[in-house]
Image: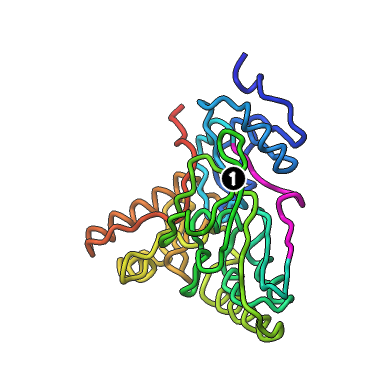
Amino acid sequence: MTWKNALPAVRGKLLIDEPLAPFTWLRVGGPAEVLFLPADEDDLAAFLRVLPPEIPLTVLGVGSNVIVRDGGVEGVVTRLAGRAFAGLTLDAGAGTVVAGASALDNAVARAAAKSGIGGLEFLSGIPGTVGGAVTMNAGCYGLETAGVLTAAWGVDRTGAKRVFKTSQLGYAYRHSNTPEGFVWTGAAFRGSHADPEALGQAIAAITARRETTQPIREKTGGSTFKNPPGDSAWRLIDAAGWRGKAMGGAMFSPLHANFLINTGAATAADLENLGETVRSDVLAKFGVTLDWEVRRLGVQRTAE
């Protein structure tokens, strides 16, 4: 009997050898040994309390900035879905928003704007969830999650529920000190009073800018590489001659040179190999090392 046959009972779902490609925006990758979809935070905590510590745990959000490798992901992958993790509570008087970890960043921005809570409009330009934004200090157009977050909470690898203030998370550019194996379940944000109509117009402007400068209708994963200090990844990729260039089924977008695209039949290996080739070329030509912003999860597929 394997560990997969001895998992504890849950109120959510436990799926064995579940394909993960459908859960990611790039639509590539192999299966999770076990995919756990908890019913709520208590279900998640109870499961983690008894999950053997040697079993790897991976957290998957909406899959907007993830390459799942073709060999799949070992251990347990947990994904928060459903109303239990996507709720929004807004207090216009206090200028606060409380959001579940699986709430879309765009939904948070739009709900805040409708309630007259300003300062969160930039979240409408981030293709992901609150949990991912908290983990990676997601941002765009010069603003970051750390600037509006007041606290976040979730469940650690032992099943204990914990709350963190923003100051405890060691935020830097696209980085936080989120504990290993921690699963965010919610977060609180603070904005400022503003006119809902003006906020709606600001979000519309962000949306229009994204539609004209980013390949948001394609199978993509957002920004592939972090911007190096004092420069931009897209400029370096473009200057190295990789805009619109393909390898297998993978391509760097002709519209935005820092966006990897699955043109239809890409494997995870195609995407990662193209990315690594570009990293090597940029380093050779400009002496700059590009760091991945897209998360790469799992193992490479072994030769038959």
Whether residue 263 is visible to the viewer of this picture, yes or no, is no
Dot 1 alpha-carbon crowd within 10 angstroms: few under 14, some 14 to 19, many 20 or more: few
Asked whether 81 falls inside the magenta stretch, the response is yes
Q: Is residue 39 left or right of residue 247?
A: right
- Residue beneath disc 1: 162
Question: Can you give x and y, in whole percent of width and height, for residue 198 in the image?
Answer: 66, 86
Vertical placement of residue 86 versus 73, above or below: below
Which residue occupies the foreground of this view, 121 or 286?
Answer: 121
Residue 39 lies in quadrant: top right
* Residue located 46% across and 70% down the image: 256
The kind of residue on which mark 1 rests is Arg
Asked whether 95 falls inside the magenta stretch, the response is no
* Residue located 66% across and 24% down the image: 7
SS state under label 1: strand
Which residue occupies the foreground of this view, 124 or 148?
Answer: 148
Vertical placement of residue 32 versus 192, above or below: above
Residue 5 lies in quadrant: top right
Q: Is residue 216 left or right of residue 97?
A: left
Q: Is residue 22 left or right of residue 267?
A: right
What is the span of residues highlighted in magenta in the rendered image? 77-89
* Residue located 65% across and 67% down the image: 106
Which residue occupies the foreground of this view, 76 or 16?
Answer: 76
Question: Can you give x and y, in whole percent of width and height, for residue 80 in the image?
Answer: 67, 46
Quadrant of the image containing the N terminus: top right
